[in-house]
Image (spheres, rainbow, N blue to C red):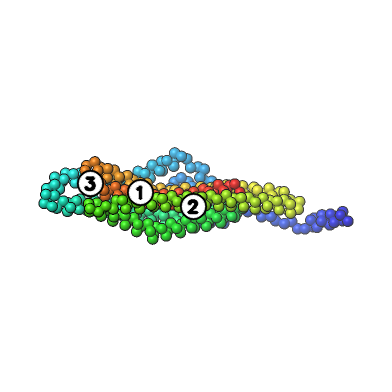
Amino acid sequence: MKNILLLAVILVLWVMPGMQVSAVTKEEILAQSGADSIEVDEQTRSFLESQSISFTDPQSVLTLSPKELLCSMWNTFRSQCTAPLRLFFTLALVVVCAVLTSGLGDTISERGLSDAYGFLVVMATVSVLLTPMEQCFSLVSETMESGSRFMLCFAPVLSSILAAGGCVVSASVYQVAVFSLAELAVQLSRLYLLPLLRILLALAVMDAVHPDLSFGSIIRGIRQAAQWGLGLMMAVFVGLQTVQGVVSASADTVATKATKFMLSSCVPVVGGAVSDAYTTLRGSVGVLRSGIGSVGMIALGAMVLPPLILLGLYRLAVLAAGTLAELSGVRSLSKLLHSLEQVLSLALGMLCTFVFLLLLTTAIVLIAGGTA
């Protein structure tokens, strides 16, 4: 009876028409993921083109050399130096003029008008600083929003590649995390960040104008509270992403092993070959995943690097001018500039935290996906 059944199976397989098996290549996966539709700004696109890097060719990231990258960063630094240097020399000129007219201030103080003199000195400094400070505040908000828009375009692409490679759970966790972080950044920048920075700017001006009022401690307290809040948010978010990354990688590993077992056991005759082909496909998709993830991280870094450098240079310029005013004995300007330096420090810290969380989230999912 067994021989008859075996003979029948052989005859059926012999007379069955050949079935065409279509294997999906990594080029097709890349084309279907929508990598060519990722939008970046003109400056980031110019950087990627200058380094011969593109989302449609993820392996092009291997051609990036440290020397060329450092040269690009140096050129970006040089291009951002002009405005902060101009601001520093302008503030230094204001400090020198305040020192030269200090004798006039003493004369005026004898007439009981020293407060008016200090007010004029502070207002002259504020007129110099108002436009750069507003530019810095707007730059932080715009950078956070543009980074969020980029990640909202990039996350579905990387998630689809992760899912195609068998990391379905990791893909869903990553997409939810990026969407939540991007939405949080947009809401914070629009509703809280800009108003808070402008309020701190007004408090810094009032602190310098009115000697009897002291808002410096309030500014320092808000800055420290914001730093503690950012640190706590970063710790919670990173810890959550790490735990979810480990768990999702374990779930994807179990699903992958189960799929390979079913292919090798349930597919007659060629089950082992199909299982090996599936392993090979996952390996090629893993290369694609790493390439796309690396290009996305480089693009995000190129997008936020100029604003970070500009904010850092503005902070250094204000800090240097405040130190010069303190050494020159111009107390009102020293208080104003040191308070504004703390405001710029807070803005820079918020932007750095946002960028770090996005980069770390992508790195975690790439590492976790590689272990699945």
Front in this rendered view, residue 170 or 237? 237
- The amino acid pointed to by label 2 is Phe
Identify the residue at horizontal 59%, vertical 46% (top origin): 371
Query: What element does badge 3 sit on?
Result: helix
Mark 1, residue position? 345
Give percent across and percent down for residue 231. 43, 49
Query: What element does badge 1 sit on?
Result: helix
Mark 3, residue position? 331
Q: Circles 2 and 1: CB distance less than 8 Å?
A: no
- The amino acid pointed to by label 1 is Ser
Label 2: how many Cα within 10 Å (few below 14, some 14–19, many 20+): some
Identify the residue at horizontal 31%, vertical 48% (top origin): 341
Q: Earlier in the sequence, mark 2 or mark 1?
A: 2
Identify the residue at horizontal 52%, vertical 57% (top origin): 176
Q: Which mark is residue 237?
A: 2
| Position of residue 79 in the picture relative to residue 57 (left or right) | left
Q: Nearer the viewer, mark 1 or mark 3?
A: 3
Front in this rendered view, residue 66 or 31? 66
Q: CA distance from mark 2 to mark 1?
A: 22 Å
Q: Earlier in the sequence, mark 2 or mark 3?
A: 2
Q: How many marks?
A: 3
Judge whether residue 83 can be spotted in this image: no
Identify the residue at horizontal 42%, vertical 40% (top origin): 70
Q: Earlier in the sequence, mark 1 or mark 3?
A: 3
Judge whether residue 94 can be spotted in this image: yes
- The amino acid pointed to by label 3 is Arg
Give percent across and percent down for residue 79. 35, 46
